[in-house]
Amino acid sequence: MHRTPRPWIARALPVSIACLTACSSPAVAPQPPVAASPAATAQTEASASRGLAYPPTRTVDTVDTFFGVPVRDPYRWLEDGASNEVQGWLAAQDELTRKHLDTLPGRGVLRERLSALSYLERVSPPRKRGNRVFHTRQGATAEHRTIYWRDADLSPARPRAKADSDGTPHPERTLLDGTSLSADGSVALGIWEPSWDGKTLAYVVHPNGADAGTLHVKDVATGKVSDIDVIPGAKYADPQWNAKGDAFYYVALPTDPKIPAADLPGHSEVKLHKVGTPPSEDKVVFKATGNPETELATQISRDGRWLIVSVIRGASVIELHVSDLSKPGASWIPLVKGHDGTMAAVAWKNRLYLQTTEGAPKGRVFRIDPARPERARWEEIVPEDKEAVLESVRVIGGHLALQYLHRAQSEVQLRTLDGKPTGRGKVALPGIGSVWGVAGEPDDDTAYVYFTSFTTPGIILQLSVASGETTPFYAVKAPLDPAAHDVEQVFYPSRDGTQVSMFLVRRRGAPRDPSTPFRLNGYGGFNISLTPSFQPDKVAWLEAGGGIAIPNLRGGGEYGEAWHQGGMLTKKQNVFDDFIAAAEYLIQNGYTRPERLVIDGGSNGGLLVGAAMTQRPELFRAVLCAVPVLDMIRFPLSGDGKTWIAEYGSLENEAHFKALIGYSPYHRVKAGTAYPAVMMLSAEADDRVPPLHAWKTIAALQAATTSGRPALLRIEPKTGHAGGDRVKGRVDMWADAMAFALHAMDVTPVLGKTTR
């Protein structure tokens, strides 16, 4: 649950295997820092050819010095989002963007198709708690999820509706309607968790879809929301119920306004809240170190005995602590300290099952007796797989459920608690795609596997752990032809010769054509993997005659911890080299040409496309840059920035500084450069990556570009970093972004085809 910049333009696409190679990319050497020097005449000339008159933007003579290197920051004043001047500037920018978007042909067609692909009924896997079953459903016309519950029998088989004496099932009952949280739909429903007895619901709500949230408690039988159990500072809260169902543990942030927002993670605490008591009485059971680069996460075992706390730094879990709740006053067991990589533990029947990359970059599993937690006593039960990356470990139905990535595609294996194969092989999946989770309980044979691919919006499979057999439980229905597109996986060399995999999706049977509008999307950071998944905007792009490319860049987790570390800190340039090489592969192999190539990415992926744009502007026609990190000199000073230092580097380290200033997109914007068309997709309530990154960089681009192509800022109101959960907001945003990109390539979208 760490709060690093996450994939905002979600995962990747499905594949069929086809290994190809291409010529390596030419070298792209990081340039010395060059701050934007806007000139009014350059700004006017750049905007005039498209009829755009950018709002006047003043500059300031602000210079910071690091290790003897002066770094200019002419748009520092835009960081003060509360000032009237900045608010007026933002309003003028957004108004200009909206007027430009209103002139674009085909936007209505795109919005219509995106609506059809986005307004789909979706159901979550069921959760059995006591004598009740809980799930969410979002109706085909709904903007938000609704939580439902129903009575269930007590058999260990699949939860089913409990019938009356005449055989009529009890109807499901509404527990929490997401549309009721706010009149304008701006409040999003976050994490929700029923108690083990099914009597009480704990849930988090997020005003404006921001990360900041408040935790509430609701009685299931009466539907009454407690006015006592109202817990602020629930940005990282993930309520973990005790066995009795009368209390839960959660991660809390202080609400003291005197503590800078960027320092809050270091002050996080694990607290115990007893239902019916005010939060002021909550007991602190574990405190963070005070280091703002770290944050906490917690979980409790199914039997309520073992409480596990993770200390997270960047994309690594650096410490694990375990407490035996059956022994009042028991001290914490420091299971692991000083780790650097992936690590997670689950507890069942007095044993811990530890997933770790320690000594195994692709992951392995140890079984640990918490009464004898010394490292020498750990028992390796699942060794490292040299070909596949271990993503997660769950104990379900008395077995280990292991989720792997093999060549960026999901696999699920079942093993005994000794780590031995069951002899049933891998769990059968509907095709090549992504598993977004295996849900189930240690004492229940039934598990649920959520599967998606490029042509599969979502399928929930019911899995019997004992037999290994799956049956369909629920499938999202979407108006599309699953056989309409071909998917392949190719491999290409990056600048240093490293082989990088990439998914390519095109209309079935279509020949390679350099006039094809291609979208190149990536992320490359924080050990996050881009894998095949259904995304309405990409389907609509394909149906308009375009192609999709998603490379698995270094910095991600597709090929293990070594792959991740190969794209972080002073090696971050590898990520951009991988991405640029992907673009050159597409061009050199006749899939597209620079005039028909758009790049898009969000959050850390926004940094990616910002770096690619400023390093190789001639390679792309349009850039869609969403909720991005772009000022790599001041990123630690706001939002969750300090928690990313482990990934990006510290400005107190000279080698890190040189790497950061070498690729920082904001500082690389250079006056007199012909930049691609750019749309910054900014979220008004983003408290994870503050929108000042987008504001400052778009100001620099508007002043610097000589291409005559637009550089625009689109602001989504009442929305946070993750975009909230309103369907309409996503549809409108992607209709705007796609119309902008296609227009920049001189392509007019028509349903089922494009005009060029």
Image (cartoon, grey):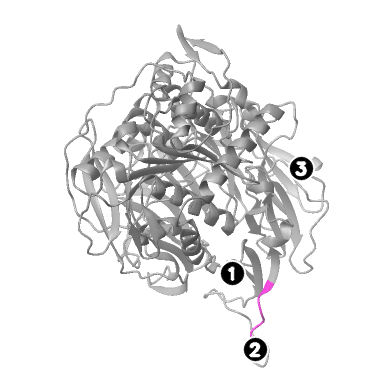
Q: Quadrant of residue 533?
A: bottom left
Callout 1 crowding tier (Cα within 10 Å): few <14, some 14–19, many ≥20: some
Instruction: Tell me the tag on residue 168.
Output: 2
Q: Which mark is residue 139?
A: 1
**Residue type (three-letter) at the residue carrying disc 2:** Thr
* Towards the viewer: 672 or 175: 672
Q: Residue 474 in the image: x percent, y percent?
A: 48, 72
Q: Which residue is mark 3?
A: 282
**Amino acid identity at mark 3:** Asp
First along the sequence among labels 1 and 2: 1
Residue farthest to the bottom, as pictured: 166
84 or 23: which is nearer to us? 84
Whether residue 111 sits left or right of residue 745 in the image: it is right
Residue 267: percent from left, percent from top: 66, 30
Q: Kindly report the secondary structure that dominates the magenta region of the rendered protein.
A: loop
Disc 2 + disc 3, Cβ < 8 Å = no
Q: Magenta span covers which residues?
A: 169-173
Q: CA distance from mark 1 to mark 2?
A: 23 Å
Q: Is residue 91 visible?
A: yes
Q: Which badge, 2 or 3, is on the more N-terminal residue? A: 2
- For the C terminus, give its image quadrant: bottom left
Separation of marks 2 and 3 at Cα, in angstroms: 44 Å
**The magenta stretch spans residue 268:** no
Query: Considering the numbered disc 3 on the image, is that residue within a helix, a strand or a loop?
Result: loop
Q: Residue 418, located in which quarter of the rendered image? A: bottom left
